[in-house]
């Protein structure tokens, strides 16, 4: 049975999933288009995260 949607905004907020999002605009700036992030160098971010992860792992090994 289909339910009538009385207020579309809460329906979108509470029922949408990440896969439903294609484009994102924040404060007038398009930050994601066609599911591609435009404002972050993803490769550099992954490299930095990997380096930090390795550093944390090395520090944890020294403390045991």
Image (cartoon, rainbow, N blue to C red):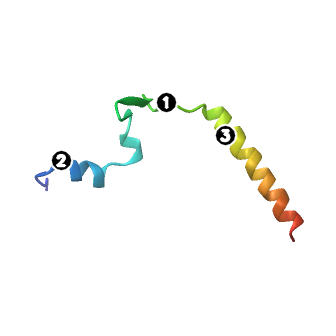
Query: In the picture provided, is 58 more to the left or to the right than 36?
Result: right
- In percent of the image, x 36 and y 41: which residue is there? 20
- In percent of the image, x 60 and y 31: which residue is there? 41
Q: Give the Cα separation between the discs numbered 2 and 1.
A: 26 Å
Q: Residue furthest front?
A: 27
The residue beneath circle 2 is 8
> Depth check: 20 or 64 in front?
64
Label whose residue precedes the other's in the sequence (2 or 3): 2
Q: Residue furthest bottom?
A: 64
Tell how many labels: 3
- SS under mark 2: helix
> Depth check: 17 or 46 in front?
46
- In percent of the image, x 42 and y 28: which residue is there? 33
The residue beneath circle 3 is 46
The residue beneath circle 1 is 36
- In percent of the image, x 49 and y 30: which residue is there? 36
> Depth check: 3 or 64 in front?
64
């Amino acid at each position: 049975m289909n339910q009538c949607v009385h207020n579309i905004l809460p329906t979108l907020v509470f029922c949408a999933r990440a896969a439903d999002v294609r484009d994102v605009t924040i404060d007038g700036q398009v930050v994601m288009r066609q599911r591609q992030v435009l404002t972050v160098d993803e490769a550099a971010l992954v490299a930095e995260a990997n380096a930090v992860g390795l550093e944390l792992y090395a520090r944890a090994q020294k403390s045991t």
